[in-house]
Amino acid sequence: MFIKPARTRFAPSPTGHLHLGGARTALYAYLLAKKTGGQFILRIEDTDLKRTVPGAEQEIMDGLRWLGLEYDEGPDVGGKFGPYRQTERRDIYQHHAKILVEKGHAYPCFCTPDRLEKMRQDQMNRKENPHYDGTCRNLDPDEAAKRIANSEPYTIRFKMPHEGVTVAHEHLRGDITTENKQLNDQVILKTDGLPTYHLAAMVDDHEMQITHVMRGSEWLGAFPLHVNIVRAFGWDEPIWIHLSVFLKPGGKGKMSKRETAAAMKDGYSIFIKDMQELGFTPEGVMNWSALMGWGVAEDDVMTVSQMVDRFTIDSLTPSPAAINFQKLDHFNATHIRLFTTEDLTARLKPYFTREGLIVKDDVLLKMIPLIRERLTTLDDCISFGAFFFKEDVTPNPEDLIAKGLDAKQSAEIARRAYQILEAQPDISHERCEPPLRAYVEESGLNVNQVFGILRVATTGQKISPPLFESMEIIGRDVCLRRIQNAIGILEKL
Ligand code: GLU
């Protein structure tokens, strides 16, 4: 069956960090475009100048690329429907606002901010929902033209129908019917000549030939207005899809600033940039967020390209999804196990260098199979494997004392182990493990006592990857030196 290629867009406002919700919206839009052989577009909605944050646009672009959501058209890649930054499209919006005024669907409004504020207060005092009272709706057009000619500041408001109902079709929710008398004449062009979201997004979605509008369900409230704007122009409507909201862990309400900060303390974040720094992988983040709002099996492990094959908009669900960071851990760990050793080498290296360690690639390649199964986040490689790259380790003296023994006895064990290892022609685990096990047998000690001392001596920590394989990678000379050092520490206790 031929499926028409979809043109989808991710249209963030550069007002803060790229977060989980945005990333998931972008993912679904990307999946639909790729599934149908269409295009995925990045459009920057920056018309609210007061809220624009410097650097936010770059963070969005970097974040999308890191996640693997390469866009076909966008501010920094161009495309034939550009520009893709709304502040560079002022003329287009002014032209369209004028069309609506001429068609009788919009009107200039000269109400001052003071007057509007007073109106709002009065309405609230009367326990009414704040709404525009229509003062300028029926202004005589000649009078309006005169005031414009006199340079009086004005906005353009959309003239909402007063009678009847608006029926708007939403893909996941069916027909949504709203009484028109509940609707408000919203500003679509501001006094500074810039559009509000309501006009800019409708114009751009049309001009950029967007077939499916995927956006957060916080826009459902403005949905009847948007449908009316599109219809006033006489344009075909896109397919509208309002994605489910994310609730904080536990379920009730959205993540507050305080909860976001608390999550960060636990090693989690809802911001993509933080997730990257915390050692989450794009594969893990995408898999985790994809399943919050998409009705496939909850534990399906997929890369973005595997998602493309399976994606349909009909399988999206409108119900809110609670954020579950344990699942993020699960997906991240699962994907780490699926990476090739070479791939993981390249991903882990920056975490070691970030710690000031000098990484030898051959050592990294050898140690990865030993630590891979233990990693939940990429930065876990530090706690499991930094000792491979350190000149020397500094074990906690107490940890060198084996359970049930004292420092003297532990030093004796370390000395014996040293002799055994020194007598071997190499430090391969095949060579070293049998004589050390034989020593455990004949000495009547237990494995944990002997190997525990060796582990702390050679790795500097109580928990490590498999001991003999680790020692082999650390190398003979370094191992012997570290054991010697441990003996010295024990002798001083
Ligand atoms: N600029 C809007 C926002 O960031 C975009 C909504 C949309 O995708 O249409 O919420």
Image (cartoon, rainbow, N blue to C red):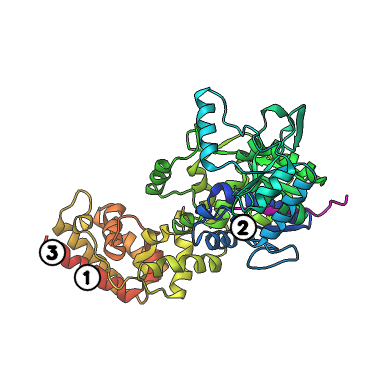
**Magenta residues, as a range?**
1-12
Q: Is residue 327 above or below residue 131?
A: below
Left or right of residue 29: residue 443: left
Residue found at the very far top of the displayed protein? 126
Q: How many marks?
A: 3
Task: State which tag comes first along the sequence, 3 or 1.
Answer: 1
Closer to the eye: label 1 or 2: 2
In which quadrant will I find the C terminus? bottom left
Q: Position of residue 51 (x, y in %)?
A: 51, 52
Local secondary structure at mark 3: helix
Local secondary structure at mark 1: helix
Q: Main secondary structure of the magenta part?
A: loop
Q: Which residue lies under the disc numbered 1?
A: 484
Q: Which residue lies under the disc numbered 3?
A: 491
Q: Is residue 475 above or below residue 402?
A: below
Task: State which tag comes first along the sequence, 2 or 3.
Answer: 2
Residue shown at the point (42%, 59%) measured from the top left: 379
Q: Are marks 1 and 2 in contact (CB under 8 Å)?
A: no
Task: State which tag comes first along the sequence, 1 or 2.
Answer: 2
Residue shown at the point (21%, 65%) measured from the top left: 486
Dot 1 amino acid type? Gln
Dot 2 amino acid type? Ile
Dot 3 amino acid type? Glu
Local secondary structure at mark 2: loop
Label 1, residues with CA under 10 Å away: few <14, some 14-19, many ≥20? some
Give residue 44's mark: 2
Q: Position of residue 450 (x, y in %)?
A: 27, 57
Which residue is nearer to you in this view: 245 or 325?
Answer: 245
Label 2, residues with CA under 10 Å away: few <14, some 14-19, many ≥20? many
Q: Is residue 423 visible in the rendered structure shown here?
A: no
